[in-house]
Image (cartoon, grey):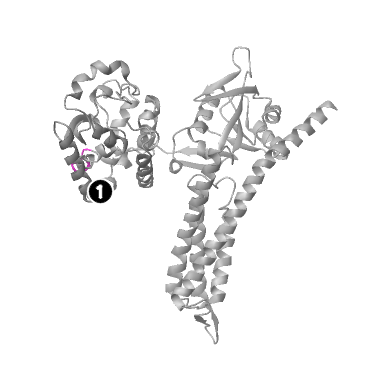
């Protein structure tokens, strides 16, 4: 009788707690559905007005005799488009608000729709105006993407206010739960907040919590008391990671036990810093298998990236030429010495090169490094100071907005650097690399990179290394473009720049 009452209490608390998440997710989904409808209806209406001069213009001739207006076509396309968006689960709780899967599903639904329209028109011998479709399709697809991006920014804003959160209970071995909690901590905008962990031993007098970054996460139970721990923490989801105590049968039972509580189960494979394009899930003998492709080192060295680097650097130099001229004059007029500063850096395969920057320090700055060693704010072997006395007044402005790095596009044109890549290291840094860290030298260093858009000088040494290795192992051209886009925001904000 006591057990039954306890189970009912768990169920009641689980449903009560999860109602908060269910409420905001349902509200978010309704807003997406409404705004998607507005975008699609506006796209087909604009296409009809532009192509035929009004909402009542245009006629589609029937193959035998007669005709019907394009207003019917517009209504049909809008209804079919919205139906496919729902059919492809573009508003699924698992994809809304984060990741590329949401955009992929929208694109897939839209392309399928217009593929079906093309085939249906051919089979039914209907001559739909190509200009009408050429306006409606790209306009609607672009509008849907912009709409989702706007709602994502709203979700990010809410998450900064500790709203739109999914509370997670992590279950597994000590090392595994710490790594999983750290992965969630690195991406606060994903909306997952770890509220507790369950380990094989549970809380003990010696160890009652784990520290992950700025978080102190309580150990609330053992990995055999998950339901009780869900009740204690009010978790919305359970993240199950590596543990010896859970077999396939146990996982199936846990799914059934969590279902009436409205609590999700997330099974984490324990791999980190692996991009989605390297992962493929497939069922084998009734079990889901996660296949991980080899690191993409070679792709980051192919001709396509070289062509992009040269083209982007050429365009960038043309655009920033007036800015560089003004900066050169300011440097020359305010301090003694050369306009440019050349410093040795180590490039791909350990080859040294002279990296070009605008001079931001006084001429004899290098002679005072040893005197300032105790004030080093840099990570690992990297020397950095937030209030470096060697930096000139103009140099502080240049560094704050990374203007001093603009001449590095000349290194890109010379083939020594890439637009996007790992941070260019000093020789003394490379001399301290171990075998793993030396993989940073497998590709050209970059003018910008993941390190630039993830904290710049505020990053720890280990975090900087992790980001660089993640970049070269998961390289893609889309990732390069996203990093360039984020760099503009990071530079404007000037966070971590000194």
Residue 208: give x, y in percent of width and height. Answer: 61, 17
Closest to the observer: 497 or 446?
497
Q: Quadrant of residue 6?
A: top right
Closest to the observer: 268 or 217?
217
Q: Secondary structure at mark 1?
A: helix
Give the total of numbered labels: 1
Q: Does residue 300 belong to the magenta stretch?
A: no
Q: Pointer 1: what residue?
A: 316
Tell me which residue sits at (18%, 45%) in the image. Answer: 325
When the figure is inspected, residue 138 is found, relative to residue 491, above or below; the finding is below
The 10 Å Cα crowd at callout 1, few under 14, some 14 to 19, many 20 or more, is: few
Closest to the observer: 81 or 296?
81
Residue 450: give x, y in percent of width and height. Answer: 37, 37
Tell me which residue sits at (48%, 59%) in the image. Answer: 143
Residue 417: give x, y in percent of width and height. Answer: 24, 38
Q: Does residue 414 belong to the magenta stretch?
A: yes
Magenta residue span: 412-416
* Observer able to see residue 431: yes
Magenta region, main secondary structure: loop
Tell me which residue sits at (20%, 48%) in the image. Answer: 321
Tell me which residue sits at (30%, 33%) in the image. Answer: 423
* Observer able to see residue 445: no
Q: Quadrant of residue 405?
A: top left
């Amino acid at each position: 009788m006591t057990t039954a009452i306890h189970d009912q209490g768990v169920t009641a608390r689980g449903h009560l707690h999860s109602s908060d998440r269910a409420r905001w997710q349902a509200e978010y989904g309704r807003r997406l559905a409404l705004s998607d409808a507005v975008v699609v209806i506006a796209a087909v209406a604009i296409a009809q007005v532009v192509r035929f001069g009004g909402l009542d213009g245009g006629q589609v001739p029937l193959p035998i005799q007669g005709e019907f207006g394009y207003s019917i076509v517009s209504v049909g396309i809008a209804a079919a488009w919205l139906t496919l968006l729902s059919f492809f689960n573009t508003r699924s709780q698992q994809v809304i608000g984060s990741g590329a899967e949401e955009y992929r599903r929208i694109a897939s639904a839209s392309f399928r729709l217009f593929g079906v329209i093309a085939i249906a028109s051919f089979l039914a011998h209907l001559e739909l105006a190509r200009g009408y479709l050429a306006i409606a399709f790209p306009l609607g697809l672009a509008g849907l993407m912009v709409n989702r991006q706007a709602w994502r920014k709203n979700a990010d804003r809410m998450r900064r206010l500790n709203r739109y959160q999914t509370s997670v209970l992590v279950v597994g071995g000590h090392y595994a739960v710490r790594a999983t909690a750290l992965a969630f901590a690195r991406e606060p905008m994903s909306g997952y907040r770890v509220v507790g962990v369950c380990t094989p031993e549970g809380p003990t007098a010696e160890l009652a919590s784990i520290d992950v970054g700025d978080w102190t996460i309580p150990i609330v139970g053992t990995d055999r008391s998950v339901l009780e721990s869900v009740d204690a923490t009010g978790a919305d989801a359970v993240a199950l990671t590596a543990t010896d105590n859970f077999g396939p049968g146990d996982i199936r039972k846990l799914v059934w036990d969590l279902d009436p509580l409205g609590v999700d189960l997330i099974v984490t494979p324990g791999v980190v810093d692996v991009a989605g394009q390297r992962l493929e899930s497939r069922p084998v003998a009734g079990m889901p298998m996660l296949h991980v492709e080899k690191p993409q080192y070679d792709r980051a060295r192919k001709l396509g990236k070289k062509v992009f680097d040269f083209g982007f650097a050429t365009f960038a130099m043309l655009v920033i030429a007036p800015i560089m001229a003004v900066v050169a004059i300011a440097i020359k007029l305010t301090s003694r010495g050369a306009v440019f500063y050349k410093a040795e850096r180590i490039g791909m395969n350990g080859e040294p090169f002279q990296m070009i920057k605008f001079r931001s320090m006084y001429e004899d700055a290098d002679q005072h490094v040893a005197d300032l060693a105790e004030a080093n704010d840099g990570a690992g072997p990297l020397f950095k100071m937030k209030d470096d006395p060697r930096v000139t007044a103009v140099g502080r402005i240049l560094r704050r907005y990374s203007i001093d790095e603009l001449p590095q596009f000349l290194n890109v044109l010379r083939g020594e650097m890439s637009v996007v890549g790992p941070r260019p290291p000093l020789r003394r840094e490379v001399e301290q690399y171990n075998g793993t860290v030396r993989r940073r030298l497998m590709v050209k260093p970059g003018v910008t990179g993941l390190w630039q858009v993830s904290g710049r000088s505020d990053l720890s040494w280990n975090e900087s290394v992790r980001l660089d290795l993640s970049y070269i192992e998961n390289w893609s051209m889309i990732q390069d473009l996203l990093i360039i886009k984020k760099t503009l925001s990071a530079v404007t904000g000037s966070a971590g720049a000194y």
